[in-house]
Image (cartoon, grey):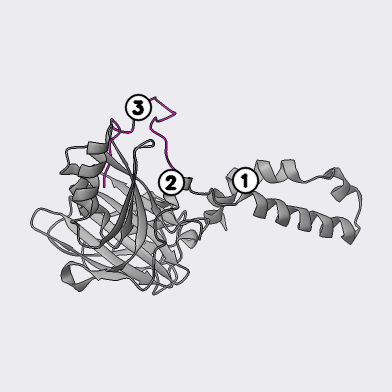
């Protein structure tokens, strides 16, 4: 199952290093004891090394997301609660008060915690990422989304698919709320006005664009319905999806079609990649080029 390789590759070296026995002994004997011993050690090592990092103490003062607390948004869409983290350029208590005051006026925001030392704002609620980002922008401070999900509950709690042009741009975010529910948010531009089908497809193979991403993933789970594109070529979507698990989607693709008909080859596709969950991304510098988080481009 090639699409799972990205999940386990980073841990392969750790697993091999922690197995406290000579690998050569496996091949020098046909004894079932060696195979059983190998199996137990690999399982223990894999489990130990895939523990999700704990949140910093400052994040523990927030209430946990509740599956019962939901807020209606435009078009009657109901979104489940999540904890969302932004890196926000703040330097004083006045910045903290301004950010908190603004976010507390946003519909669906239940709780706001500001960590001034780390310049991190944690928001608990059912508001869309786009709405929270716009509110932070209105405070005049630079902000960037750095994590979303339910703390400590899932090894992989968030994923993202980015459409990077040159004609169609967009970001699709998926966050695991519980084992039976995923929250999906999407923003697109560059599409023709009207209705466009979109879906999660089997493969992340983009060699022929959307046409090489295979069939619909686990029908009907992969069917995302239609996008309503306005006269500016923009579309926004927010909604829950039952029975969909983020961990099963890594390495697959999201495809957008020219019409409501999913039988056409598709306009554009993007691979679904793991995204940072809560408490997993407090970096202010890009290690590849030294760019600060404020200078990096962002499609929210």
Give above or below for 270 relative to 36. Answer: above
For disc 2, the marked residue is: 58
Q: Which quarter of the figure has residue 64?
A: bottom left
Q: Please tell me which of labels 2 and 1 falls first in the chain.
A: 1
The residue mark sitting in front, 2 or 1, is 2
Give above or below for 168 relative to 63. Answer: above
The span from disc 2 to disc 1 (Cα, nearest Å) is 29 Å
Give the structural element (helix, strand or loop) at label 1. Answer: helix
Give the structural element (helix, strand or loop) at label 2. Answer: helix
Image coords of residue 285 (percent x, y)? 39, 30
| Residue 291 - label | 3
Farthest residue toward the left? 231
Overall secondary structure of the magenta section: loop
Q: Which residues are magenta?
A: 281-300
Q: Please tell me which of labels 2 and 3 falls first in the chain.
A: 2
Image coords of residue 273 (percent x, y)? 43, 50
Between 168 and 141, the one lying in front of the other is: 141
Q: Is residue 252 left or right of residue 39?
A: left
For disc 1, the marked residue is: 11
Q: Residue at x 65, y 45 (%)?
A: 12
Question: Quick check: is 49 in the magenta stretch?
Answer: no
Farthest residue toward the top? 290
The span from disc 2 to disc 3 (Cα, nearest Å) is 27 Å
The span from disc 1 to disc 3 (Cα, nearest Å) is 28 Å
Q: Please tell me which of labels 1 and 3 falls first in the chain.
A: 1
The residue mark sitting in front, 2 or 3, is 2
| Residue 175 - label | none
């Amino acid at each position: 199952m090639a699409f799972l390789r990205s999940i386990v590759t980073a841990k392969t070296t750790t697993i091999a290093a922690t197995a406290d026995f000579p690998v050569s002994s496996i091949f020098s004997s046909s004894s079932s004891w060696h195979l059983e011993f190998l199996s137990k050690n690999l399982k223990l090592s894999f489990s130990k090394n895939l523990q999700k990092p704990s949140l910093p103490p400052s994040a523990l003062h927030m209430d946990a997301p509740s599956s019962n607390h939901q807020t209606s948004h435009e078009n009657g869409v109901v979104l489940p609660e999540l904890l969302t983290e932004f890196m926000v350029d703040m330097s004083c208590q006045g910045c903290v008060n301004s950010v908190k005051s603004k976010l507390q006026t946003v519909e669906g925001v239940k709780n706001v915690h500001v960590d001034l030392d780390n310049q991190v704002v944690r928001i608990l609620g059912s508001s869309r990422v786009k709405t929270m980002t716009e509110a932070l922008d209105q405070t005049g401070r630079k902000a960037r989304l750095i994590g979303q999900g339910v703390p400590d509950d899932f090894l992989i709690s968030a994923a993202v698919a980015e459409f990077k042009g040159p004609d169609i741009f967009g970001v699709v975010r998926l966050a695991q709320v519980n084992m039976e529910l995923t929250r999906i948010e999407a923003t697109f531009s560059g599409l023709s006005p009207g209705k466009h089908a979109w879906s999660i497809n089997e493969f992340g193979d983009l060699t022929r664009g959307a046409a090489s991403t295979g069939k619909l993933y686990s029908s009907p789970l992969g069917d995302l319905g239609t996008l309503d594109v306005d006269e500016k070529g923009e579309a926004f979507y927010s909604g829950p999806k039952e029975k969909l698990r983020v961990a099963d989607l890594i390495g697959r693709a999201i495809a957008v079609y020219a019409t409501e008909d999913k039988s056409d080859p598709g306009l554009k596709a993007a691979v679904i990649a793991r995204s940072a969950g809560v408490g997993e991304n407090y970096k202010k510098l890009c290690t590849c080029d030294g760019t600060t988080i404020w200078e990096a481009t962002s499609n929210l």
